[in-house]
Image (spheres, helix red, strand yellow):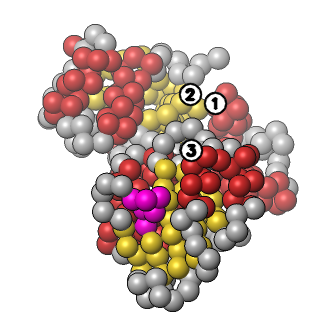
Amino acid sequence: MPQGWMIRAGEGGRLFDLFESRSCVAVGWNALGHLSQYHSNQELRHAYIEHHGNAKPGRTANAVAMIRKFFDAIKPGDIVVTYSPELREYLVGIDQGQYEFLSSDYQVEDYAHVRWVKWEGKVSRDVLTQSTRNSLGSTLALFSLSDAIINEMRAALEGKQPALSQEPEEVEADFVQLSEHIRAQSHELIKDRILQLTPEDMEHFVAAILRAMGYRTKVSPRGPDRGVDVEASPDGLGLTKPHIKVEIKHRSGSMGSTLLRSFITVVRSGQNGIFVSTGGFTREARYEAERAPNPITLVDLDDLANLAVDNYQNFDTEGRALLPLMHVYWPAD
C-alpha cells in the first residue's frame, strides 16, 4: 500500500490555491539549494545550520528530517494531502515521482523545493471522523499518514461515509482522549525543561514558586547551606508562620532516608519543611517524612511541574525567565 503524506501549504494554508493550480506541493529552506547534493543527513544538517543557525537544536533536527523526507522518503504513487484552513478542505492527490529545485522565476511563490502531484479531489474536514481530524491536526510542515487515514480519505473522495460512523458519545470520547494526551505531553515537556536547570537555578526556581504562592523568600548563598537552600515566610524574616525551610536535591536517582533524616533535624518546632528531589524518593524516605516530629512535605519532579503550572500566572520576572511557558487556548469541556 502506498504511504501517505501531509504537506502544509505554507503558514495558514496560504499556498493552497497555488498547490492546486500548479499541481504540486512545495517547501521552503531555499538557501539549501538542490537537495541531491547532500549524500547524508549529516551533510544536510551542516548545511542547514550554516544557513539557518542552530539556536534550537530540536527545531533543527525536525527541519532536517522533514527536508530529507520531502526529497527521498516520498515515493512515486504515494498519497499526498494538503489543507486549507479557510475552506476546511483537504486536497488529495498522487505523487508523480519528480522532485525539482526551481529557479526564482518559477518558484511556488517563495518556495523552491517542489514535488509534482496529480490531484484527485477534495475532502471536507467535516466528513472525517474525529480521530482522523485529531491526527491531521499536527502543526508540522510534513508528516506521514496512517493507512486508516488514507483509506478514509479515499472513501470520502468516492462519496462514501466512514465505515464506522461515530455517535456523538464516541466523538466526545475521542476529544477527551486527545485532550488528556496533550495535557500529559505538555506535562512531560515542562518536566524536561525543569530538568535542564542547573542546581543553582533550581534553587531560584523553587523560590519563585513559593513567591508565586504568596511567600517572601531567601535563597542561601553558595557554599555550605547547613541543609537549607531556601527559606520562606509571609514576612520574609521567618517571624510569622508558616516559617518554611527547603532543601533541594537536583539529581537523578531516588533520595534515600539518610539525607532526609539530616534535613528533619534542622526543621525546628513550629517550622515546616519541604524537601525537593527531582529524582524522587525511596519508600524509606517517605516513611521518614511521615513520622517526622514537624511537618515535612516531599516534592518530586511531577509535583514541581504541577506547582509551576498552577501558580504560573503569579510568577515574577525571574521565575518566568527560568521556565518560559506560553498560554494555550483549548475548547472547554
CB under 8 Å between callouts 2 and 1?
yes
Q: Secondary structure at mark 3?
A: loop
Amino acid under disc 2: Gly
Tell me the quarter of the image containing the N terminus. top right
Q: Is residue 145 left or right of residue 113?
A: right
As rendered, which of 166 and 305 lies closer to the eye? 305
As rendered, which of 170 and 249 lies closer to the eye? 249
Category of crowding for the residue at label 1, using alpha-carbon neighbours closer than 10 angstroms: few (below 14), some (14–19), many (at least 20): few
Amino acid under disc 3: Gly
Q: Residue at x 70, y 32 (%)?
A: 148
The Cα–Cα distance between marks 1 and 3, rounded to whole angstroms, is 37 Å
Asked if one can make out residue 70 in the rendered structure from this viewpoint, the answer is: no
Upstream in sequence: badge 2 or badge 1: 2
* Label ID, residue 279: 3
Magenta segment boundaries in residue numbering: 225-230
Per the image, the residue denoted by label 1 is 146
